[in-house]
Every structure is written in structure tokens, then in C-alpha cells.
Image (spheres, helix red, strand yellow):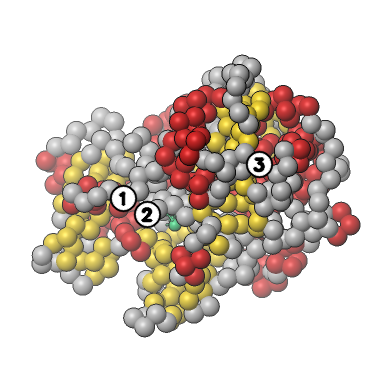
Amino acid sequence: MAWPTILKSTRDRVLPPNLANYNQFRESFSWRRAAQELTGLPEGNGLNIAFEAVDRHALGAARDHLALRWLGKNGEVRNFTYAQLMEQTNRFANVLQELGIAPGDRVYALAGRIPELYIAALGTLKHRAVFCPLFSAFGPEPIRARMTIGRAKVLVTTQSLYERKVKSIRSALPFLDHVLLIGEDSLPPNLPDTLDFQQTVSHASDAYTIQPTSPEDIALLHFTSGTTGTPKGAVHVHEAVIAHHITGKLALDFHPGDIFWCTADPGWVTGTSYGIIAPLTNGITSIIDEGDFDAERWYGILQSQKVTIWYSAPTAIRMLMKAGAEMARQHDLSSLRFLASVGEPLNPEAVVWSKEAFGLPFHDNWWQTETGGIMIANFAAMDIRPGSMGRPLPGIEAAIVHRKNDGSIEEITEPEVQGELALRPGWPSMFRAYWEEPERYRKCFAGGYYLTGDLARRDQDGYFWFVGRKDDVIKTSGHLIGPFEVESVLMEHPAVAESGVIGKPDPMALEIVKAFVALCPGYEPTEALRRELLGLARTRLGAVVAPKEIAFVASLPRTRSGKIMRRLLKARELGLPEGDLSTLEND
Ligand code: ATP
Ligand code: MG
């Protein structure tokens, strides 16, 4: 698709990284000082995410700077300056006010990546209601379940999603007082408590004064990806904006004038923390693409929009690799300055490939729905160690710990020893609860740490290396093996597009390593190839760690946010119940 180009590029400028000297910056960092980069509500009325993201720019010199540029599926373009975004989000906040929505009430959104979703999110935050995004590809049951957990009071959705997914469950949502429908046509008559989004918003006043907001007021309710089990509703507060802002600046290296594209959907935390909030608080321009993944389309966007910073995920990068580096090289991607990835381990192969395709490496970073923002990252100024997640952000204390049988926690200080990745609580975007699941929340903390449920190791220079999720780790003949290491070696073979590795129960070894492999176009799943892959793995990993079995599959089961669901590969292998599938893609 040929997008019109109207954005300016920053590529000709020499930009020193925001985090130039890691150790020095880390030592002098404090969250209090980081908070001073924000303005706070006028007259000392507290801290509100939407004010920091929109109003403080709209009320200042940046009022006419482009905040959001939306690219529609079919080639439409809509631009919003900071001033226009302030006006639109004020209107939405007034709509909530008129509907009698109180601070703390939950406003859900079920929509694709369309401007109304962004307006609703920021308007909800202005009104101090709690914004809860749902991924638009969810079916009626996951929608019903999540709306019931958070007792949604308002739902913003599109006419077609309502027809297909909400209508059939509406009677099961007695707490849902209002639905705002986004649509081209006028509304079908006789839908109780249902309003036309555009009409309602355009009739509301464009002036809104944000009421005093405590940094601890609840702002966001985010459901996790459900990779390992039932999704949890992580609760975040307005103070999180300090972390969104500073991590955008330090880990994604936002500079004034940047054009940033976060490919994540706001249905997942990345699409909110970095797809909405962080670029806006930093006053830069954010690209929103309504379309789904398509390699040609994506390269077209990077080129025509002169994207300077691109934040994506391993699953998308693997798909781009499948399409070939040649396709990337056919585009002028010279505006790109910084590439980052999150969501899953980024195989070293992908980092090497991205240098070949873009002349720039992808910088992996690690965080979770629960942490609200980036915690560990490869920074712009740092040498990347392909396969490593990088080093903790300033203000973040990360450790490798061992949970002893009696429940106590022992910190592992020796390098290269694997254990659970743990963080010292106290950063602003840390989740404050799992919605109405206090016991589940409590269990995440021990010995003064938040325990992440991921296994990792730290090398002697302080870089962290992901080993696997605790639930995915394979126990074989007295060894603990992380699937990531095995998957990464298989990925080195040109035939392998992606792989998922599990432990398969075995009477002798407890578990054996089994790999599922999806091939690149042009390769056949032959016995000879299987033997070649087994041979490669044995040479690179040794006999204990190398897979004993390899199965060729057309594709791997993934969450809708793109993560390989190893628990499902395992359940299917063993003929066990498949568990919660609400976040499974293409089910
Ligand atoms: P659930 O908790 O419901 O099983 P989830 O953990 O996949 O789902 P998210 O919060 O979206 O939900 O994902 C965070 C997890 O994703 C991390 O705990 C980690 O396992 C994985 N992850 C994120 N970034 C990275 C990374 N850079 N390297 C390795 N793993 C990562
Ligand atoms: Mg998780």
C-alpha cells in the first residue's frame, strides 16, 4: 500500500542515546527525580496519566505537534495533534460525566486499533474511571468472563463487534449500564442503554477539568496473556505514568521529533503502556496501524511514515524473517534509528538477521503485564549480547533467587546460576493487585521480592538471560533445561521458521526434550531433515540438552498476543485437557 508521506524524519540528526553511561545514570537515578520530568495536575492536584500524555503538551508549545497518526486498513489516514487529542478526550470524559460514571468505575473497550479506542482510553483516565481494554479478536465467552470479573459499567465497542460478540451475552452482564457503539451507520433502533459513540461524543463539551487525582488511584485493569493459565487482571494506578514516561525515554530512546511505531494491540499491556501512554508523555508522534500483520504492508509503513523507533515482538520478527531479508532491503528504511522487541525471548538468530535486513539490531527487553513497564533492556548505548534481555532499568533492582522448600528466599549472587527472576517492589508501574484475587497476588511476593515466575540467569557483567517460564522448564535426567536455548539453536538452521520445545514424560529420564518445528517455505518435512536437525542440536547443545524427538508441524499454537503456548503443545502431546483457551489464536 502506498501511504502518503507527510511526516518529517529525524534520521539526519546525530542523537546521543538518552542513557549514555549506564552505571553513572543508575547510581544517580531516583524515582522522585524521574517524577519531576512530568508536570503534575495544575495547582498540585495530583498526577493523572491523561494529563501527562495529552493536556500538558496541548496547553504548551507542542499543541500543534502530531500526536497520533492513524492508518486505516484500507488506506485511510487520520491525524490528531495534541490539541485535537485534548479536545476529543475532553469530550469523552464529559460523556462519562453525563452518564453518571464515578471515579473507579470500569470502562471497557472492545475494538480494533481505531482512533475511538485511543480517545476512550485517555478520556476514561481523565475522568478517573478505570480503563480495561479487551482484545477485539476475543469470542463472546472470554469477553463475558473478563467483563464479569471487573464488573464493567460501560463498554465502548463497534457496531459489528457488538452484533457478533456482545449481543448474545448482554443479558449475562446485568452490571453493564451503558454501551457506546462506534459505527458508520445510524444505530439500530430499540437497543436499551446503547448510544452512538460519534453522536454522543460530538455533542459533549470539549472543555473538561480533570479533578484531583491521587497517584494511587486505579487507572488501568489489564488482563495477562494467559500463556500459562487463566488470565489475571493486573491493576495499575496513575503513578505508573512515571515509569511509562522514563522507560520510554531510556529503554526506547525517545527523542523529540521521533516517529514511533509500537505494533502491539492495546488489548495487551504493551499496546497501552507503549502504544498509547509513553510516546505521548514524551511528546512524540505515534503511528497506529489498524491492519493486521503483513510483511509488505509493514515495510511500506516504515518507509512512508519515516518511522524512527520501532517496537515489535519476536513472533512478528520471525514472520519477517520467513519473508526474507531481501524484501526489507527493497524498501528505504533509512529513517529507522532504534529497534526494540518484547513479549517472548528474542532468538539470537533474529538479532543477527535484523542487522542484515535493516542494518540495525533488535534490542530485546523484558517485562510483564504485572510490571506495567520495561524492567530489563538492551539500551541504545550498550553492546547487545544476542539472546540476552539486557540489564535492569535505572531504579529497578533485579535478582536471581531460589525459593527454598520452606518457602524462604535465597538470593543467588554467583553469576551464571539459574533461578527465578525477582524484582524489589517499589517502582511506580508495579501492579497493585490482581483484581479480586488477593490470595493470588499475595503469593507473588516473598522475602522482600516480587517473584516473576520466569527463570533466568545473570552473567558476570550483569546482563540477564531468559531461561524459560517456570512452568515450561524441562527436568531431564537431573538437569533443568529452558526451552528457549533449544529453540534458538534449532532456529539457526535455515529450514526452521520457529520451534516450540517441551518436556515429554519419560519413565527413565523423568522428561525428555521434544521439539515441535515449523519450516520455512520451500522446505519439506523429511526424515533426512529431522536427522540433520537432531545432529545440529546435539553438536551445539550436547546430548542431554538436545531434543530426543522432533515433530514437524504447520504452525505452533500461540496466544493472540503472539506467544508460543508450550503448555498447549504439552497437553496435546499427552492427550490432557487443554485448559483455558480464551487467548489462543485461531481457535
Ligand atoms: P500469563 O501470565 O497469563 O501466563 P503471560 O505471562 O504471557 O500470560 P504477559 O504479562 O503478557 O502475559 O507476558 C509476560 C511474560 O512474557 C513474561 O513473564 C515472560 O515469560 C515473557 N516475556 C516478555 N518479554 C520477554 C523477553 N524479552 N524475553 C523472554 N520472555 C519474555
Ligand atoms: Mg505471566
Q: Position of residue 225 (x, y in %)?
A: 44, 49
456 relative position to 437: left or right: left
Q: What amino acid type should be assigned to the residue bearing mark 3?
A: Ala
The relative height of residue 430 versus residue 113 in the rendered view (above or below) is below
Q: Residue at x 34, y 81 (%)?
A: 405
Looking at the rendered structure, the secondary structure element under dot 2 is: loop
The relative height of residue 149 versus residue 159 in the rendered view (above or below) is below
Q: Which is nearer the eye, 470 or 106?
A: 106
The part of the image, by quadrant, that contains residue 140 is top left
Q: Using the numbered discs, state the Cα–Cα distance from disc 3 to disc 1 in whole angstroms.
A: 31 Å
Can residue 76 be seen in this snapshot? yes
The residue at which mark 3 appears reads as: 121
Q: Residue at x 82, y 33 (%)?
A: 205
State which tag comes first along the sequence, 2 or 1.
Answer: 2
Q: Which is nearer the eye, 179 or 31?
A: 179
Q: Which of the numbered marks, if any, corresponds to residue 579? A: 1
At label 1, counting other C-alpha atoms closer than 10 Å, the crowd grade (few under 14, some 14-19, many 20 or more) is: few
Q: Nearer the viewer, mark 3 or mark 1?
A: 1
The image quadrant where one finds ligand 2 is bottom left
The part of the image, by quadrant, that contains residue 339 is top right
State which tag comes first along the sequence, 3 or 1.
Answer: 3
The residue at which mark 2 appears reads as: 229
